[in-house]
Amino acid sequence: MKRRDRTLITHAGNDPKNNKGIVNPPVYHASTVLFDSVADMHARGRDKFNNVHYGRYGTPTTFALEETVAALEEADRAVAIPSGMGAIAGAILSFVGVGDHVLMVDSVYEPTRFFCDSQLKRFGVETSYYDPLIGGGIAALIKPNTKIVYLESPGSHTFEIQDVPAIAAAAHARGCIVIMDNTWASPLYFKPYRHGVDLVVHAATKYLVGHSDVMMGIITMREEFFKQVKTQVHGMGFAVGGDDCYLALRGIRTLSARLAQHQESAIQLAKWLQGRPEVERVLHPALPDHPGHPLWKRDFLGSSGLFGVVLKPATVERVNAMIDGMELFGLGFSWGGYESLMVPSSLTTARTATKWDAAGPTVRIHAGLEDPLDLIEDLHALLDRQDDLHPVLDLVQERDLRGVGVDERHPREEELEHLGAAGEGEEQVVVAVGLVEVLQLLYDLESPFQVLLRQVRLVQDVEQGTHGLAPAGRNSALLARGVAALARACPAPAPRITVGLRNSTSSLFLTWSSR
Ligand SMILES: Cc1ncc(COP(=O)(O)O)c(C=O)c1O
């Protein structure tokens, strides 16, 4: 009887009846496998891909994992490999030789591009890249020696959705094999074999394992390709360890529950980001205004936790400062684990058949399993911080004031208080004004000297407030650096200026004193 996905996830690959009733498969650690006789050795060797024969060809733990993923993906067979990149290389190398040609989607995972442009090239295999939105138009690019049409949908970092059935039909009409990287959707949210794909690669490292603790790749396929792929993969010496297979299988048991939460949280974050003034557009195919949404709706069964955000134009420094300030979002490669991540996307050299023309920087977000409201709060703080930093950082940069005697340390609270205290013979005024007003003031003025003059005037106009400085937050430290740079760029004798913020963001204390 055909079982539904959530049932398959729970039971596939387990065999308690033949395992003393124990629910989970045992972890086999194996290299040598002993035979009863030479005849037995030969007999099992004749079908070594389907028998326990030697550690490299797999153990019952490996087979349990492979059987589970194949069942979920509606494939006939699966082969586990030590990483997602291994699965990609293994699948491609199974079908090409000298003089062949591969058609590769332009929005592919960048190391796949690197593999094609370096290793495949060295082996005499040519790769050309096609627009992910090409659809059936791919027919015009297929050459007599094209062996593979390779897809990845959505695109890496840019999230274009491909018309998989149209591309597969055109490829099959010319005898090409269709390979797809289905890591984003996992076998739960996209069923490649229903749409004409012949072989699928997964970075199981991501959602299948799901806990950021194992590198693993899986190729799934129709039976007709199994022998060729297994011969290639094991001929290259790839083999996975029993513990890793067990952890991957354990991860898969909770895939449906995890993925549902990743999906919900990512959509929540994406919608919230859409409403922020710093955001140009959100790259998430499940959002109705995403250009690939109609295709996503037609073909996919869900969306995962990974999406992109194009910010309004901003300097690299500004975006980096924002990312550096993250609390819940980690900065690191990979995704698909239980934790949230954010990385800047570097797309300048990653496209050759198309042009990525967003004016602002792009970041990639993975929504983990934290409470989405906490994630939104973290994003809120990040974007607010980015807003606070814009004018001063821009001013410092615009006027090329970087390095003009700027104190790179972030002053601590006590230091600021010390700096804020008036010395003997010093005049001091403390101004409490809104942060925005002061930044506006700094931003609008023409020269650093005028900035200071305006500050003095402002200071004289404002009622004298409390003496001293507010707690030093991260923002105040950066502001202090910006203003210190301005001060140093002024004609001597340079005044001493310090800046502090009260309650991190609400009001600004500007202490100006001169001798
Ligand atoms: C879409 C996609 N495919 C493949 C891979 C490679 O997987 P692995 O890191 O397990 O080699 C990655 C890794 O980030 C990926 O994002």
Image: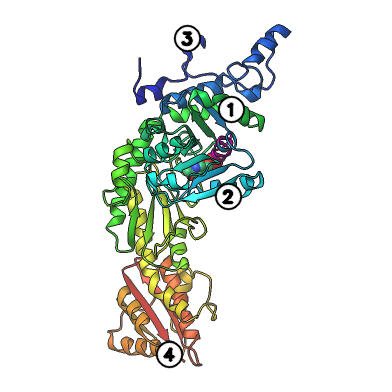
Q: Earlier in the sequence, mark 1 or mark 3?
A: 3
Q: Is residue 39 above or below residue 397?
A: above
Q: Which residue appears farthest toward the front when viewing the image?
A: 144
Q: Earlier in the sequence, mark 2 or mark 3?
A: 3
Q: CA distance from mark 1 to mark 3?
A: 32 Å
Task: Indicate the secondary structure of the residue bearing disc 1.
Answer: helix
Q: CA distance from mark 4 to mark 1?
A: 74 Å
Given this view, does label 4 or label 3 mark the residue nearer the observer?
A: 3
Q: Is residue 173 left or right of residue 26?
A: left
Callout 1, which amino acid? Gln
Q: Residue at x 67, y 16 (%)?
A: 33
User: Mark 1 Cα within 10 Å, few/some/many (few <14, many 20+)?
Assistant: few
**Count the marks: how many?**
4
Mark seen at residue 449: 4
Q: Earlier in the sequence, mark 4 or mark 3?
A: 3
Q: CA distance from mark 4 to mark 3?
A: 84 Å
Q: CA distance from mark 4 to mark 2?
A: 51 Å
Instruction: Name the residue that disc number 3 marks.
Output: 17
Instruction: Name the residue that disc number 2 marks.
Output: 114
Q: Position of residue 468 (x, y in %)?
A: 39, 76
**Would residue 207 be visible to someone looking at this image?**
no
Q: Please report contact status of discs 4 and 1: CB closer than 8 Å, yes or no.
A: no
Image quarter of the N terminus: top left
Q: Which residues are magenta?
A: 82-91
User: Mark 2 Cα within 10 Å, few/some/many (few <14, many 20+)?
Assistant: few
Instruction: Name the residue that disc number 1 marks.
Output: 228
Callout 3, which amino acid? Lys
Q: CA distance from mark 2 to mark 3?
A: 46 Å
Given this view, does label 1 or label 3 mark the residue nearer the observer?
A: 1
**Residue 86 among those drawn in magenta:** yes
Q: Earlier in the sequence, mark 4 or mark 1?
A: 1
Task: Indicate the secondary structure of the residue bearing disc 3.
Answer: helix
